[in-house]
Amino acid sequence: MTEERKDLCELPVPEIPRCLQIRTVTKSLISYADSLKHPTYRLAAHACIWAPTESGSLFGDLRALVMMHLRFDGTFGFPGGLIESGEDIVNGLNREMAEEIGWDTEVQSVTWKDYHSSQVDHDKNLVLHFFITKITESQYADLEKKCLLAPEYGNEVFGTVRVPLYTMANMYSGLPAFLNNKFVGTAKQQLLLTLFHMKILTEEEIGDAMYKSQNLKLAPNRF
């Protein structure tokens, strides 16, 4: 094990804000050290790519660009996938991202410094690792163009989206409405944890968006 990965074993489990703890979206996180206790389980890794922005929006305050994609099964998720047997987790993640969104490691790459958290699915004998990668706004725009030329575009990936991180005047459109989509696995939790830990939104703003998502979706003025 490299010194960098030894350091990961000393990291605590990331904080889950209270607004997620009291919602059904939350599934428990484990430390990287605990993730090593399942050597026979398959490995998977995914990454949230985001960029700070000052470009703004016509519809509300937009502080960052956060990338998700529409998957072949009709759910939203993050780029990544299963790691091949004997493959380094980070190398496998970068490979999967190259296939799904045209990620070019000569321009930027996910590293162990981007590691955020792990989860385990005992029913599927699967350990999942999540990474958060910050890039520039111009790099983000270039990546969106490359997504269309990715090998898996139109196969595993049906489109890339920017998450609307604002709430519009009707108090539902924007992030609250987006949160009512179907997300694969724990991708919804991963999105909200990214917003919290990268300080893109405050805990109060995340909690407010979750409340409006669940309580205003049937309101007559929702559109």
Image: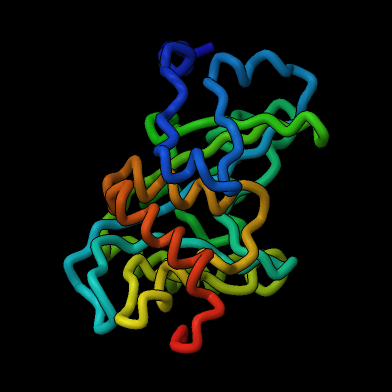
Visible residue check, residue 44 = yes
- Residue 135 in the figure: left or right of residue 123: left
Colour setup of the view: rainbow
Q: From the viewer's perspective, is residue 9 above or below residue 126?
A: above
Residue at left 54%, top 62%? 101
In which image quadrant can residue 50 be found? bottom left
- Which one is in front, 200 or 97? 200
Q: Position of residue 70 (x, y in %)?
A: 61, 68
In the rendered image, the quadrant that contains the N terminus is: top right
Q: Quadrant of residue 17?
A: top left
For the point 36% across and 50% down, which residue is it?
195
- Left or right of 150 in this view: 174: left
Above or below residue 125? Residue 40 is above
Residue toward you, 23 or 160: 23
Asked whether 170 or 102 is in front, the reply is 170
Residue at 19%, 72% in the rendered image: 55
Residue 123: image location, x then y, percent: 82, 34
Q: Can I make out residue 151 in this image?
A: no
Left or right: 202, with 7 as reference point: left
Q: Quadrant of residue 46?
A: top right
